[in-house]
């Protein structure tokens, strides 16, 4: 079987790593990949947003299965285009991708289907958003407000403003931050409080199979300090959600969501990602993503036992209910190593050392995110988040100890990472 993975980050490296373990995969391609992925797959020089050439390549190469890594390709309708040509692909349609590509659409969808979520207002201009804030619809001057760009913004379009003044500042700066297209509509939300958890699943119609619950660490610095990033580390552990909480999420959020997609004519098929806040009054949905997260994927897929090809077949063929998916017991942890000056203007081109030692650590895998090939077969930094050192263990403490032991082997100029992932 020939498999194509679309994307170039740590998420896609983890996906390729899972496919490479399958005995059914005879040839693995990645468009456009990175230096680490190139050790597992043939990297193809086609950008993830170049839908026409992706379709052409898959057709010419007789690709048997394509897996979409990121949201940009999905929002451009890559799944629709592949399916029009009879090509098998894992991911939601362009219509279903609106659950992620438009915050306003997603919030309206939640309201229509009774999904518990934060109070919100969608403003069609910065002036309208400021007027809503000044009227006090989201509390007094000292109230926290979440300000979101409606469109895709590569993780940069959400600001948790601790006061009304900070929220107004965020509204006025949003266009500069993410561009006019993403910030054409601005969504204001009440700020919810409680532990955040992410719950991902394979989904096909109204059938779904849960993955291990995970928690991301967004801010750049220890103690959740500094600006938000794409994610500085993740963990999976059974303590993140109780059985009762999981049942509530299934009944109140997952089932209404998948049923709502069917009722509205865009049956969901692919990876559904729930960003959740576990409030005192129960779970509430912060956002949908319609694909694997990064670095959530790294910490989830290292625990996958079942052949990923078998799961993808079940999703594409609408028979997810007939497959048992097995996960390695215990916990996992991913520690992201980022470049100097990330997330603002990351330094690039530095030689990375110590990767062999890190990969040799117990139950540890180093996933490449922002790397390129260097002299003499080495690796250079080429992005903000450079590597994701990922380990499993019988307990969360063991997984974390192994991941940080792997991190200690790695060195490049200006490297930075959080010391408190999972703690």
Image (spheres, rainbow, N blue to C red):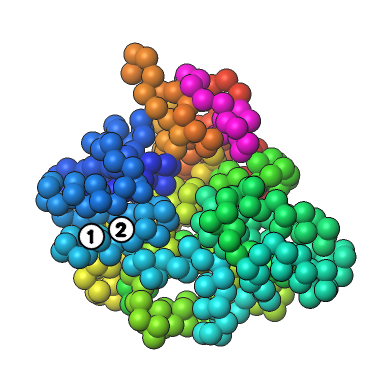
Q: Residue at x 83, y 73 (%)?
A: 136
Q: x, y percentage for residue 411? A: 53, 22
Q: CA distance from mark 1 to mark 2?
A: 6 Å
As drawn, 278 above or below 113: above
As drawn, 337 above or below 378: below
Does residue 84 appear anywhere in the picture?
yes
Q: Is label 1 in contact with label 2 (beta carbons under 8 Å)? A: yes
Asked where in the image residue 75 lies, by quadrant, the reply is bottom left
In-image side of 82 versus 368 (left or right): left
Residues in magenta, as a range: 337-353
Q: Residue at x 34, y 77 (%)?
A: 267
**Towards the viewer: 237 or 118:** 118
Disc 2 packing (10 Å; few <14; some 14–19; many ≥20): many
**Towards the viewer: 108 or 407:** 108
> Mark 2 — residue?
78
In-image side of 155 versus 99 (left or right): right
Q: Please name the predominant secondary structure of the magenta segment in the image.
A: loop
Disc 1, SS: helix
Q: x, y percentage for residue 185? A: 60, 65
In-image side of 145 versus 10 (left or right): right
> Mark 1 — residue?
82
**Towards the viewer: 266 or 321:** 266
Q: x, y percentage for residue 419? A: 65, 38
Asked where in the image residue 123 lies, by quadrant, the reply is bottom right
Q: x, y percentage for residue 213? A: 51, 62
Disc 1 packing (10 Å; few <14; some 14–19; many ≥20): many
């Amino acid at each position: 079987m020939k498999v194509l993975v679309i994307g170039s980050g740590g998420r896609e490296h983890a996906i390729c790593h899972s496919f490479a373990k399958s005995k059914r995969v005879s040839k693995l391609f990645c468009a456009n990949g990175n230096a680490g992925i190139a050790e597992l797959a043939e990297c193809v020089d086609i950008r993830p947003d170049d839908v026409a050439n992706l379709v052409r390549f898959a057709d010419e190469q007789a690709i048997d299965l394509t897996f979409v890594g990121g949201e940009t390709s999905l929002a451009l309708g890559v799944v629709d285009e592949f399916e029009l040509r009879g090509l098998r692909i894992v991911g939601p349609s362009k219509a279903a991708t609106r659950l992620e590509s438009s915050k306003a659409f997603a919030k309206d969808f939640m309201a229509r289907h009774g999904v518990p979520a934060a109070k919100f207002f969608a403003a069609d201009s910065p002036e309208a958003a400021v007027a809503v804030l000044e009227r006090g619809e989201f509390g007094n001057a000292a109230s926290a407000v979440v300000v979101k760009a409606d469109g895709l913004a590569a993780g940069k379009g959400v600001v948790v403003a601790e006061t009304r003044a900070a929220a107004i500042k965020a509204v006025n700066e949003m266009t500069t931050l993410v561009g006019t297209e993403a910030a054409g509509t601005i969504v204001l939300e009440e700020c919810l409080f409680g532990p955040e958890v992410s719950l991902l699943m394979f989904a096909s119609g109204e059938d779904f199979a849960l993955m291990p619950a995970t928690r991301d660490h967004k801010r750049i610095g220890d103690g959740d300090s500094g600006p938000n990033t794409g994610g500085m580390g993740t963990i999976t552990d059974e303590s993140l959600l109780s059985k009762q909480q999981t049942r509530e999420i299934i009944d109140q959020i997952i089932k209404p969501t998948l049923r709502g997609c069917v009722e509205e004519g865009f049956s969901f098929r692919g990876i559904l990602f729930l960003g959740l806040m576990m409030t005192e009054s129960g779970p509430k949905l912060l956002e949908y993503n319609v694909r694997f997260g990064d670095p959530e994927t790294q910490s989830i897929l290292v625990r996958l036992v079942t052949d990923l090809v078998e799961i993808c077949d079940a999703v594409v063929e609408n028979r997810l209910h007939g497959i048992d998916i097995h996960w390695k017991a215990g916990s996992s942890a991913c520690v992201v190593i980022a470049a100097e000056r990330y997330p603002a203007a990351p330094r690039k081109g530095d030689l990375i050392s110590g990767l062999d030692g890190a990969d040799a650590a117990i139950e540890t895998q180093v996933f490449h995110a922002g790397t390129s090939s260097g002299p003499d077969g080495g690796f250079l930094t080429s992005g903000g988040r450079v590597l994701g050192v990922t380990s499993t263990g019988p307990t969360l403490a063991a997984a974390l100890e192994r991941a940080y032991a792997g991190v200690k082997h790695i060195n490049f100029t200006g490297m930075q990472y959080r010391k408190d992932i999972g703690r």
